[in-house]
Image: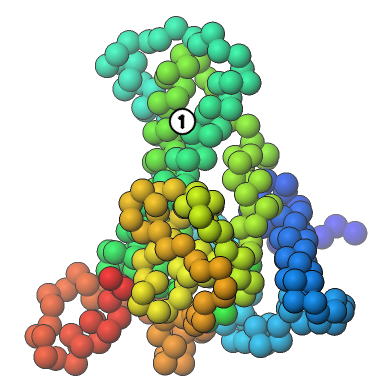
């Protein structure tokens, strides 16, 4: 029986999200995250001489208070919007990574002349560009995140992600399409410049090692632990490791509504850019008492329509002349300003 085109497209989208090995939300990466979480809980319980029971583990992995929360329900809605709606909107307005890359190559050739093709083995040149593009992606991620927290207009859209008061892997989809649009363009520009520069230096087209178009290093990090950044499991990296990698605890600190944690840990997989630019907060060994979510007094923060429309008006308010400092509007603007 032939299925309607819409149904086929629905399953095709789900397949690309869950079954593509290069997807950042693939089933293999989710299963790896679950495996790491199980091992972590087993080790913690054995350290405290506690028995390991299936029901106890199940409750620890999937707390009812999280699964039954309005915040989690909103994340589910954002997942479907992100996969089936936002992707079409954002994808059509992103600067071409390849266009930027080709433009950089052309500019360098016109300025310095062509270079002879590298004599390096393919393994070396491809490994170098793979690492370079991964570092470029991380720098782009940090840059976008920094701007999203510091520029009031951008914060109004990024704030949607920070309205989550519980964290699950689905929280990664809790983003406003304007936030996604800005992020995608910054990533395209930074990685395009990096790719063009490296290809010019090698004197020939050199491709990164990838898994279905995803940088292999990024895919490996996602499979290792990145999903656990949006969970309740306190897994901290400390010492030198905590200055290089963003542990799950690093990112939970980032979501904290404690002012001491504002604008900290802005990286994705790596902490090196936070370390370099002074935005790093290394989590403590023992779990810190955290609460998540901005604007928790707003009853509509988990309403999808409200969260998609309201930021547009708030962002527009930053383009209008500032009201008198003692007016109710000014007070509201100060209350909703990005954390500093």
Regarding residue 14, the answer to whether it shows in the image is: no
Q: How is the image coloured?
A: rainbow
The quarter of the rendered structure image containing the N terminus is: bottom right
- Figure quadrant of residue 73: bottom right
> In the drawing, does residue 301 fall left or right of residue 55?
left
> In the drawing, does residue 38 fall left or right of residue 160?
right
| Label 1 Cα neighbours within 10 Å, binned few <14 / some 14-19 / many ≥20 | many
Regarding residue 29, the answer to whether it shows in the image is: yes
Compared with 30, 204 (above or below) is above
**Residue 103 rendering spot, x and y as whole percentages:** 37, 28
**Residue 69 rendering spot, x and y as whole percentages:** 62, 87
Q: Residue at x 64, y 52 (%)?
A: 222
Q: Residue at x 31, y 22 (%)?
A: 107
The quarter of the rendered structure image containing the C terminus is: bottom left
Residue most extreme to the left:
324
Which residue does the numbered mark 1 point to in the structure image?
Answer: 195
Residue most extreme to the right:
1
**Residue 320 rendering spot, x and y as whole percentages:** 16, 73
Q: Residue at x 45, y 25 (%)?
A: 198
Compared with 221, 34 (above or below) is below
Compared with 145, 270 (above or below) is above
């Amino acid at each position: 029986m032939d299925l309607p085109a819409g149904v086929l497209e629905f399953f095709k989208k789900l397949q690309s999200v869950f079954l593509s090995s290069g997807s950042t939300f693939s089933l293999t990466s989710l299963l790896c995250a679950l495996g790491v979480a199980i091992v972590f809980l087993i080790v913690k319980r054995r350290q405290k001489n506690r028995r390991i029971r299936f029901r106890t583990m199940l409750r620890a992995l999937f707390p009812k208070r999280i699964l039954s929360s309005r915040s989690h329900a909103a994340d589910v809605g954002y997942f479907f919007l992100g996969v089936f709606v936002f992707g079409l909107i954002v994808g059509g307005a992103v600067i071409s990574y390849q266009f930027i890359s080709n433009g950089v190559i052309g500019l360098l050739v016109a300025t310095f002349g062509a270079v002879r093709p590298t004599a390096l083995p393919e393994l070396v040149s491809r490994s170098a560009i793979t690492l370079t593009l991964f570092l470029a992606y991380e720098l782009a991620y940090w840059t976008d995140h920094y701007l999203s927290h510091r520029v009031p207009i951008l914060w109004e859209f990024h704030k949607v992600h920070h309205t989550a008061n519980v964290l699950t892997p689905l929280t990664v989809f809790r983003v406003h399409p304007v936030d996604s649009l800005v992020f995608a363009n910054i990533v395209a520009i930074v990685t395009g410049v990096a790719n063009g520069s490296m290809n010019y230096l090698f004197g020939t087209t050199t491709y990164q090692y990838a898994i279905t178009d995803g940088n292999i290093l990024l895919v490996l990090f996602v499979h290792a632990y990145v999903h656990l950044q949006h969970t309740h499991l306190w897994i901290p990296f400390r010492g030198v490791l905590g200055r290089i990698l963003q542990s799950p605890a690093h990112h939970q600190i980032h979501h904290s509504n404690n002012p001491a944690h504002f604008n900290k840990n802005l990286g994705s997989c790596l902490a090196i850019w936070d370390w370099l630019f002074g935005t790093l907060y290394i989590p403590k060994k023992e779990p810190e008492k955290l609460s998540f979510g901005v604007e928790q007094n707003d009853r509509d923060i988990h309403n999808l329509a409200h969260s998609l429309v309201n930021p547009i008006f708030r962002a527009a308010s930053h383009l209008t002349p500032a009201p008198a400092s003692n007016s109710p509007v000014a007070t509201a603007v100060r209350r909703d300003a990005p954390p500093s």
